[in-house]
Amino acid sequence: MPDQSIPEARTPEAPEGTRPQGPGDAPPRQGISRRRLLGTAGATGLVLGAAGGAVGYAAAPTATATPLTSLGSGQAMFHGKHQPGITTPVQARGHLVAFDLKPGAGRKEAAALLRRWSDTARRLMAGEPAASGDTDVARDAGPSSLTVTFGFGHGFFGRTGLEKQRPAALDPLPDFSSDRLDKARSNGDLWVQIGADDALVAFHALRAIQRDAGSAARVRWQMNGFNRSPGATAHPMTTRNLMGQVDGTRNPKPADLGFDQHVFVPESGEPAWMANGSYVVVRRIRMLLDDWEKLSAKAQEAVIGRRKSDGAPLSGGTETTEMDLEKTDGSGKLVVPINAHARITRPDQNGGATLLRRPFSYHDGFDADGVPDAGLLFICWQADPLRGFVPVQRKLDRGDALTPFVRHEASGLFAVPGGAAQGEYVGQRLLEG
């Protein structure tokens, strides 16, 4: 788990901000949106009592009330240069789902599916109901910073007759000695990432996407994750993982010099349909928490290379202080151990390899012995995985002090095209090019 992750605070430089309905957007269903409904919760309760609960999107009253919080009002843009969910600040709830095209489904069916998915994502991200068959799960909520992101796996291109358009960067990842991968929960023809600051809004989107797959695709695997809710701390803070460590201090930011170069495929890049897109590596990393929690806090800090209390480097200072890799203690021993996770994952220790991490924690219950199945849904973005994820993971594989306490159980690599322009659907330049 490289020592890079997006702080949970909402940052102004993130391109997916709030906006009004665009002139090119399809008109919403008659009535008010989920976002407007958020402000009418008090009045809606009166209507429910009088009408026996038969209130839909169009039946809510027009009177407004002050919402309890602004959490549900956050809205990310669907249309844009890049897809949402990449530089969008981390959300409290996430779902990852991979699909395989069904037998007989080819390029035509895939294009129709991406068209449906894009329309559904645009509507739900704006706080509107799905075009048809909406389940009403999120009818009382605002957009809640919902994002839906789509990608293509290696096998997608063979099944659609588009082998010549398959990017070289999408070649399968190499094997790593620490991998214990479950093939049934790895890869896939299509990949969808869903994030939101409300669990019901996120599930609503997940269910809509799964229903839209119809006869074209079937679910291959699906994973659920979470992060700390925005506003849970007194002031913006870098989030912690399930090991209790501050996780994400050195994550690159959109305002950093060279950010786009490391994260996004240039407009002049190949293949042309991947312009402004990115490649995502997804890993289900189980944390062996029973073993980890047997360590003292000091031993845990030595494994990571940072103080557990505030995330500051063991060489001193605050969380954002540059780590002094050469500093020694009174006996001449390195203060930051040579195999510390934070040392090994630094870009300057990996030929400049830079990853934009945007993970979710997960917990899938306990086994028969009471051992927790919990850890990290590791998600990292880069312009080229052979220059981003692969060199960093190879180095971790050779001698990271954290390796005995984690297990890589699933993996996937997906090509995520650039954002859809007004009137387009995601992947249109590939499927209709």
Image (tube, helix red, strand yellow):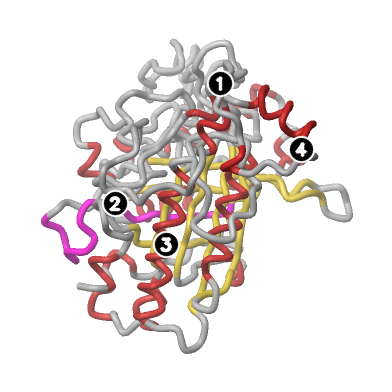
Q: Does 246 sit left or right of 267 as displayed?
A: right
Q: Residue at x 32, y 50 (%)?
A: 388
Residue that mark 4 sits on: 51
Farthest left residue in view: 268
Task: Report the span colored magenta.
Answer: 268-284
Residue that mark 2 sits on: 419
Under tag 2, what secondary structure?
A: loop
Q: Residue at x 34, y 61 (%)?
A: 415
> Gap in Å between the C-alphas at discs 2 and 3?
19 Å
Q: Does 168 sit left or right of 233 as displayed?
A: left
Instruction: Compare marks 2 and 1 and give the one earlier in the sequence.
Output: 1
* 269 in magenta: yes
Q: Residue at x 19, y 66 (%)?
A: 271
Q: Nearer the viewer, mark 1 or mark 4?
A: 4
Indicate the amino acid at tag 1. Answer: Thr
Of the pair 134 and 375, the residue shown nearer to us: 134
Q: Are marks 1 and 3 in contact (CB under 8 Å)?
A: no
Determine which of the numbered discs, if any, sits on residue 413 in the image. Answer: 3
Instruction: Compare marks 1 and 3 and give the one earlier in the sequence.
Output: 1
Q: Quadrant of residue 322?
A: top left
